[in-house]
Protein backbone atom coordinates (compact mmCIF):
# COMPACT_ATOMS: atom_id res chain seq x y z
CA UNK A 1 0.00 0.00 0.00
CA UNK A 2 1.48 3.43 -0.91
CA UNK A 3 2.46 5.62 2.03
CA UNK A 4 0.04 8.46 2.80
CA UNK A 5 1.41 11.77 1.46
CA UNK A 6 2.68 14.14 4.16
CA UNK A 7 0.80 17.45 4.55
CA UNK A 8 2.59 20.22 2.64
CA UNK A 9 3.49 22.03 5.87
CA UNK A 10 4.55 18.95 7.83
CA UNK A 11 7.69 19.63 9.90
CA UNK A 12 9.97 16.79 10.95
CA UNK A 13 12.26 17.10 13.97
CA UNK A 14 15.08 14.58 14.52
CA UNK A 15 14.23 13.27 17.97
CA UNK A 16 14.56 10.35 20.35
CA UNK A 17 13.36 7.62 19.73
CA UNK A 18 12.72 8.70 16.09
CA UNK A 19 11.57 11.60 13.91
CA UNK A 20 8.73 13.70 15.35
CA UNK A 21 6.41 15.08 12.67
CA UNK A 22 4.02 17.95 13.27
CA UNK A 23 1.90 20.43 11.38
CA UNK A 24 2.43 23.94 12.85
CA UNK A 25 -1.22 24.97 12.54
CA UNK A 26 -2.23 21.92 14.58
CA UNK A 27 0.54 22.20 17.17
CA UNK A 28 0.81 24.28 20.34
CA UNK A 29 3.82 25.29 22.40
CA UNK A 30 3.09 24.60 26.08
CA UNK A 31 5.13 26.44 28.73
CA UNK A 32 4.56 24.73 32.06
CA UNK A 33 4.80 26.67 35.33
CA UNK A 34 7.64 29.06 34.45
CA UNK A 35 6.71 30.91 37.64
CA UNK A 36 8.92 33.13 39.81
CA UNK A 37 8.36 30.89 42.80
CA UNK A 38 10.00 27.92 41.09
CA UNK A 39 12.63 29.59 38.93
CA UNK A 40 13.92 32.80 40.53
CA UNK A 41 16.39 33.34 43.35
CA UNK A 42 14.45 34.34 46.46
CA UNK A 43 11.43 32.30 45.48
CA UNK A 44 9.75 29.29 47.04
CA UNK A 45 12.05 26.76 45.32
CA UNK A 46 15.21 28.39 46.64
CA UNK A 47 13.74 28.78 50.14
CA UNK A 48 13.41 24.99 50.23
CA UNK A 49 17.15 24.68 49.61
CA UNK A 50 17.02 24.02 45.88
CA UNK A 51 19.56 25.34 43.36
CA UNK A 52 17.28 27.42 41.13
CA UNK A 53 20.05 28.04 38.59
CA UNK A 54 19.26 24.57 37.26
CA UNK A 55 15.76 25.82 36.42
CA UNK A 56 16.79 29.34 35.37
CA UNK A 57 19.05 27.76 32.73
CA UNK A 58 15.88 26.87 30.85
CA UNK A 59 14.95 30.52 30.27
CA UNK A 60 17.43 31.52 27.47
CA UNK A 61 16.72 28.57 25.14
CA UNK A 62 13.01 28.78 25.92
CA UNK A 63 12.96 32.48 25.00
CA UNK A 64 14.29 31.56 21.55
CA UNK A 65 11.73 28.79 21.16
CA UNK A 66 8.94 31.10 22.28
CA UNK A 67 9.99 33.86 19.88
CA UNK A 68 10.29 31.48 16.93
CA UNK A 69 6.99 29.77 17.69
CA UNK A 70 5.18 33.10 17.96
CA UNK A 71 6.77 34.26 14.70
CA UNK A 72 5.59 31.07 13.01
CA UNK A 73 2.04 31.96 14.03
CA UNK A 74 1.57 28.87 16.18
CA UNK A 75 -0.58 28.58 19.28
CA UNK A 76 1.17 29.33 22.59
CA UNK A 77 -0.23 28.29 25.97
CA UNK A 78 1.15 28.94 29.45
CA UNK A 79 0.29 27.20 32.72
CA UNK A 80 0.66 28.26 36.34
CA UNK A 81 0.40 25.95 39.32
CA UNK A 82 -1.52 27.55 42.16
CA UNK A 83 -4.53 27.78 44.42
CA UNK A 84 -7.33 29.98 45.65
CA UNK A 85 -6.48 32.17 48.61
CA UNK A 86 -8.72 30.10 50.91
CA UNK A 87 -6.98 26.87 49.75
CA UNK A 88 -10.34 25.26 49.06
CA UNK A 89 -8.88 23.70 45.91
CA UNK A 90 -5.80 22.28 47.66
CA UNK A 91 -6.45 18.86 49.17
CA UNK A 92 -4.59 17.81 52.37
CA UNK A 93 -2.66 15.27 50.29
CA UNK A 94 -1.01 18.23 48.58
CA UNK A 95 -1.12 20.83 51.34
CA UNK A 96 0.74 18.64 53.82
CA UNK A 97 3.83 18.43 51.63
CA UNK A 98 6.93 20.58 52.10
CA UNK A 99 8.53 21.68 55.33
CA UNK A 100 6.19 22.71 58.18
CA UNK A 101 7.21 26.36 57.78
CA UNK A 102 7.11 26.49 54.00
CA UNK A 103 3.86 25.10 52.71
CA UNK A 104 1.41 26.22 50.07
CA UNK A 105 -0.37 29.34 51.31
CA UNK A 106 2.39 30.35 53.74
CA UNK A 107 4.01 33.74 53.32
CA UNK A 108 7.20 33.29 51.33
CA UNK A 109 9.78 35.70 49.94
CA UNK A 110 7.56 36.58 46.96
CA UNK A 111 4.16 36.49 48.61
CA UNK A 112 1.93 33.61 49.68
CA UNK A 113 3.35 30.43 48.18
CA UNK A 114 1.54 29.21 45.06
CA UNK A 115 -1.47 31.43 45.64
CA UNK A 116 -3.10 33.01 42.60
CA UNK A 117 -2.52 36.72 42.33
CA UNK A 118 0.71 36.70 44.36
CA UNK A 119 3.91 38.01 42.75
CA UNK A 120 5.72 34.69 43.06
CA UNK A 121 2.86 32.82 41.44
CA UNK A 122 3.21 34.70 38.17
CA UNK A 123 5.32 33.86 35.15
CA UNK A 124 8.87 35.28 34.90
CA UNK A 125 9.20 38.53 32.92
CA UNK A 126 11.38 36.94 30.21
CA UNK A 127 8.57 34.57 29.21
CA UNK A 128 5.57 36.76 30.00
CA UNK A 129 2.46 35.82 28.03
CA UNK A 130 1.40 38.19 25.26
CA UNK A 131 -2.16 39.49 25.18
CA UNK A 132 -4.27 36.77 23.58
CA UNK A 133 -2.10 33.87 24.76
CA UNK A 134 -4.01 31.53 27.04
CA UNK A 135 -2.83 31.10 30.64
CA UNK A 136 -4.18 27.98 32.32
CA UNK A 137 -4.34 28.14 36.12
CA UNK A 138 -4.09 24.59 37.40
CA UNK A 139 -4.43 23.29 40.96
CA UNK A 140 -2.63 20.02 40.23
CA UNK A 141 0.59 18.86 38.71
CA UNK A 142 -0.96 17.87 35.38
CA UNK A 143 -2.22 20.66 33.10
CA UNK A 144 -5.34 18.67 32.15
CA UNK A 145 -6.55 18.02 35.72
CA UNK A 146 -9.39 20.40 36.74
CA UNK A 147 -8.76 22.77 33.81
CA UNK A 148 -10.34 23.40 30.42
CA UNK A 149 -7.10 22.71 28.53
CA UNK A 150 -8.52 19.80 26.53
CA UNK A 151 -11.56 21.81 25.42
CA UNK A 152 -9.31 24.70 24.39
CA UNK A 153 -7.05 22.42 22.35
CA UNK A 154 -10.06 20.85 20.66
CA UNK A 155 -11.55 24.23 19.75
CA UNK A 156 -8.29 25.32 18.06
CA UNK A 157 -7.76 21.90 16.43
CA UNK A 158 -4.49 21.10 18.18
CA UNK A 159 -3.22 17.51 17.90
CA UNK A 160 0.45 17.88 18.92
CA UNK A 161 2.26 19.65 21.74
CA UNK A 162 5.77 21.03 22.03
CA UNK A 163 6.32 20.74 25.79
CA UNK A 164 8.60 22.95 27.89
CA UNK A 165 8.78 24.20 31.48
CA UNK A 166 9.40 22.95 35.00
CA UNK A 167 9.88 20.65 36.67
CA UNK A 168 10.77 17.79 34.39
CA UNK A 169 9.88 14.95 36.71
CA UNK A 170 6.76 16.53 38.25
CA UNK A 171 4.52 18.86 36.24
CA UNK A 172 6.13 18.23 32.85
CA UNK A 173 5.95 14.46 33.28
CA UNK A 174 2.41 14.47 34.64
CA UNK A 175 1.20 16.69 31.81
CA UNK A 176 2.90 14.67 29.07
CA UNK A 177 1.38 11.47 30.45
CA UNK A 178 -2.06 13.07 30.62
CA UNK A 179 -1.68 14.42 27.09
CA UNK A 180 -0.54 11.09 25.68
CA UNK A 181 -3.53 9.32 27.24
CA UNK A 182 -5.79 11.85 25.53
CA UNK A 183 -4.22 11.23 22.11
CA UNK A 184 -1.87 14.21 21.83
CA UNK A 185 1.62 13.65 20.43
CA UNK A 186 4.21 15.39 22.60
CA UNK A 187 7.73 16.53 21.80
CA UNK A 188 9.62 17.50 24.96
CA UNK A 189 12.50 19.96 24.38
CA UNK A 190 15.31 18.65 26.58
CA UNK A 191 17.05 21.97 27.29
CA UNK A 192 13.74 23.79 27.80
CA UNK A 193 12.63 21.63 30.72
CA UNK A 194 14.39 21.70 34.08
CA UNK A 195 14.71 19.95 37.39
CA UNK A 196 16.36 20.83 40.72
CA UNK A 197 17.85 17.33 40.58
CA UNK A 198 20.23 16.54 37.67
CA UNK A 199 19.61 12.81 38.06
CA UNK A 200 15.83 13.33 37.79
CA UNK A 201 16.32 15.50 34.70
CA UNK A 202 18.27 12.75 33.00
CA UNK A 203 15.99 9.92 34.08
CA UNK A 204 12.83 11.93 33.40
CA UNK A 205 13.79 12.57 29.80
CA UNK A 206 14.96 8.99 29.29
CA UNK A 207 11.63 7.65 30.59
CA UNK A 208 9.64 9.63 28.02
CA UNK A 209 11.54 8.37 24.99
CA UNK A 210 12.22 4.82 26.23
CA UNK A 211 10.34 1.78 24.91
CA UNK A 212 9.88 3.34 21.47
CA UNK A 213 8.62 6.62 22.92
CA UNK A 214 6.27 5.19 25.54
CA UNK A 215 4.58 8.56 25.96
CA UNK A 216 6.49 11.02 23.83
CA UNK A 217 9.56 12.22 21.96
CA UNK A 218 12.61 14.18 23.18
CA UNK A 219 14.84 16.56 21.20
CA UNK A 220 17.11 19.55 21.85
CA UNK A 221 15.52 22.92 21.14
CA UNK A 222 17.95 23.58 18.28
CA UNK A 223 16.51 20.60 16.40
CA UNK A 224 13.01 22.06 16.78
CA UNK A 225 14.16 25.53 15.70
CA UNK A 226 16.01 24.20 12.66
CA UNK A 227 12.99 22.19 11.57
CA UNK A 228 10.61 25.10 12.10
CA UNK A 229 12.85 27.43 10.10
CA UNK A 230 12.36 25.21 7.06
CA UNK A 231 8.66 26.17 6.88
CA UNK A 232 8.77 29.56 8.60
CA UNK A 233 11.61 31.94 7.65
CA UNK A 234 10.14 34.43 10.14
CA UNK A 235 10.89 31.94 12.91
CA UNK A 236 14.63 32.05 12.12
CA UNK A 237 14.90 35.80 12.55
CA UNK A 238 12.85 35.71 15.72
CA UNK A 239 15.01 33.03 17.31
CA UNK A 240 18.33 34.62 16.39
CA UNK A 241 17.49 38.31 16.82
CA UNK A 242 19.82 40.30 19.10
CA UNK A 243 17.30 40.56 21.90
CA UNK A 244 16.96 36.78 21.96
CA UNK A 245 20.61 35.75 21.98
C1 LIG B 1 6.31 21.08 41.50
C2 LIG B 1 5.98 21.70 39.20
N1 LIG B 1 7.48 20.53 41.26
N2 LIG B 1 5.57 22.72 38.44
N3 LIG B 1 5.63 21.73 40.52
O1 LIG B 1 5.82 21.03 42.61
O2 LIG B 1 6.66 20.82 38.74
Image (cartoon, helix red, strand yellow):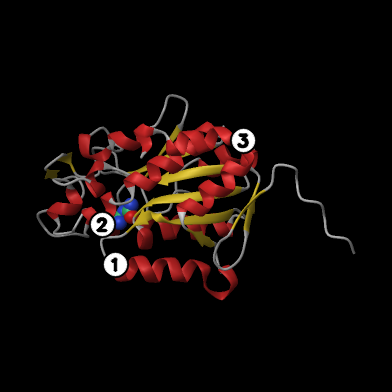
**Quarter of the image that includes the C terminus:** top left
Does label 3 or label 2 sit earlier along the sequence? Answer: 2
Q: Which of 26 and 120 is in front in this view?
A: 26
User: Front-most of 157 and 201?
Assistant: 201
For ligand 1, give the image quadrant.
bottom left
Gap between marks 3 and 2 measured at Cα? 34 Å
**Dividing the picture into quarters, in which one does residue 229 lie?**
top right
Which residue is farthest right?
1
The residue that mark 1 highlights is 198
Between residues 97 and 5, which one lies in front from this camera angle? 5
Q: Name the residue under label 3.
A: 156
**Label 3 close to label 1 by CB (< 8 Å):** no
Mark 2: few, some, or many residues within 10 Å (few <14, many ≥20)? some
| Side of 168 where 94 appears, left or right | left
Instruction: Tell me the residue that label 2 is attached to.
Output: 54
Q: Residue at x 31, y 36 (%)?
A: 126
Q: Is disc 3 placed on a helix, strand or loop?
A: helix
Label 3 vs 1, first from the N-terminus: 3
Amino acid sequence: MPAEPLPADQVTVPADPGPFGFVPSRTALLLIDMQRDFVEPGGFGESLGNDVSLLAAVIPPLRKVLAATRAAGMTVLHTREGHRGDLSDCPPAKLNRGTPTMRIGDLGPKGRILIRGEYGHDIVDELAPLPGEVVIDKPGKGAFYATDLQELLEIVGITSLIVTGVTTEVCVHTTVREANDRGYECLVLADCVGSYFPEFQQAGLAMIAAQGGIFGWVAPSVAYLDALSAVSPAAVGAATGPERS
